[in-house]
Image (cartoon, rainbow, N blue to C red):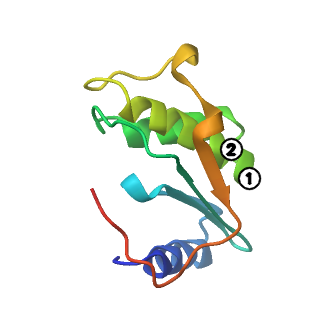
Amino acid sequence: VRTFGDAVAAARDLCERGVGTVLLSLGVDGALLVTGDAVHYGDSEPVTVRSTVGAGDALLAGFLSAGASGPQALVTGLTWATAACMLPGSTMPGPDDLDPSIIRLHDGYTPDRPLKGD
């Protein structure tokens, strides 16, 4: 998986196999939420990263806490994941660490844009 298009294609393949919703962390590139009929992409404004340990877990926890459906749940997941990256070690964010104003939900994505990786 080297591009956004590759990531979306892999997620859509899972949806075609019966998975209802795919939440895909792209690391520094943000995250995708893919269902059978929609693709949502979000990321954050640049932040100072102290640790990425647990960021994927935080993404999922935030997404689930927001109902596990739709773009607002993606924004909440990204809020938690971004907060986790700004904390030391494997520290999970608390309510005072969350800043949803730095999350950007995009209208689309560029399929051939390369993923930066971590």
Q: Which residue is mark 2?
A: 73
* Quadrant housing the C terminus: bottom left
Q: Nearer the viewer, residue 106 or 61?
A: 106
Q: Nearer the viewer, residue 5 or 116?
A: 116
Residue 110 x %, y %: 55, 79
**To which quarter of the image does residue 56 belong?**
top left
- Marks 1/2: CA–CA distance: 6 Å
Mark sitting on residue 20: none
Residue 47 seen in render:
yes
Residue 78 x %, y %: 55, 43
Q: Is residue 8 above or below residue 69?
A: below
Q: Which residue is mark 1?
A: 70
Horizontal side of 54 relative to 63 (left or right) equals left
Q: Is residue 17 above or below residue 20?
A: below
Residue 74 x %, y %: 63, 48
Kind of residue sitting beneath label 2: Ala
Horizontal side of 69 relative to 7 (left or right) equals right
Q: Secondary structure at mark 2?
A: helix
Residue drawn at (25%, 25%) of the image: 89
Horizontal side of 91 relative to 42 (left or right) equals left
